[in-house]
Image: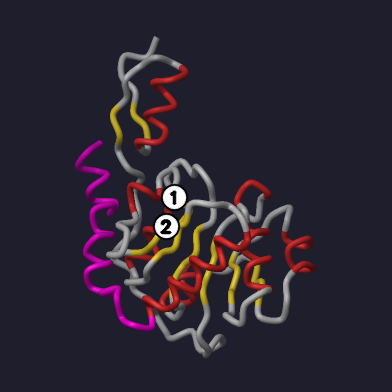
Amino acid sequence: RPDYLLTNSETTRRRIKKFYRRDATVIHPPVETNINVEKSYAKYNYKYFLAIGRLAAYKNFDLLVEAFNLIECKLIVVGAGKEFNKLKKMAGPNVKFVGRVSKNDKFEIIKNCQGLIFPVQDEDFGIVPVEAMALGKPVLAHKSGGAQETVVENKTGMFFSELNVEALISAIKDFESKIERNQFNAEEIKQHAKKFDKETFKLKL
């Protein structure tokens, strides 16, 4: 009976078409892209990759931990959830879980990372990758869902397709290599993120 449907991504628009047989208009969620970080987060003064999110089984953090257990790169995981204790027990010494943090601390940790890894399959939209890009950080994401609408391959990040440890390790190593060769331009990434700013959301709404 609704006269008009709004949805948060092309991914959810397709679901609406499939199940409700209705058209919908996409307005991406509002993201804070003008981020001011108050201080440098010196607590983690080494090179690390970052993963942020609710620690739920479907988000594939277990796959991420398994992959990092087999390589030397460091990973910081921000977030809490039912899988927290299980994942922490799985993790090797190069994987650190910090639980929930304040918004400013989250942005500081993003600002100092090498890149964000987003292993979630078929996420509706995914605000965290956009926040990372707003701070000039590239994103390695599973090639599905909303990430395909926010991440531009080889410009603001990369994709991996297969959900297995070997494929993820290969993607992480390729991602790290491109970062070390300065193949991602922080200013270009920041400009891209502004397409999803809260002011754009207000205007479209």
Residue 107 located left or right of residue 95: left
Q: Quadrant of the C terminus?
A: top left
The N terminus, quarter of image: top left
Identify the main secondary structure in magenta.
helix
Measured as percent of width and height from the top left, residue 7 is found at 37, 32
* Percent position of residue 40, x then y: 43, 86
Magenta stretch: residue 181 in it? yes
Q: Which residue does the image show at 24% across and 58% down from the upper left?
A: 194
Mark 1 secondary-structure assignment: loop
The one nearer the camera, 173 or 102, is 173
Q: Name the residue under label 2.
A: 159
Residue at (42%, 53%) from the top-left corner?
127
For residue 109, above or below residue 134 = below
Say which quarter of the image contains residue 152.
Answer: bottom left
| Other residues around mark 1 within 10 Å, as few (<14) / some (14–19) / many (≥20) | many
Disc number for residue 194: none
Q: As rendered, which of 70 and 132 lies closer to the eye?
A: 70
Query: Which numbered circle lies on residue 143?
Result: 1
Structural distance between the alpha carbons of marks 2 and 1 = 5 Å
Residue 27 in percent (x, y) is at 30, 38
Q: Which residue is at a point 37% across and 48% down the rendered structure image?
A: 148
Which range is magenta?
A: 180-205
Vertical placement of 46 versus 11: above or below? below
Q: Which amino acid does label 1 sit on?
A: Lys
| Upstream in sequence: badge 2 or badge 1 | 1
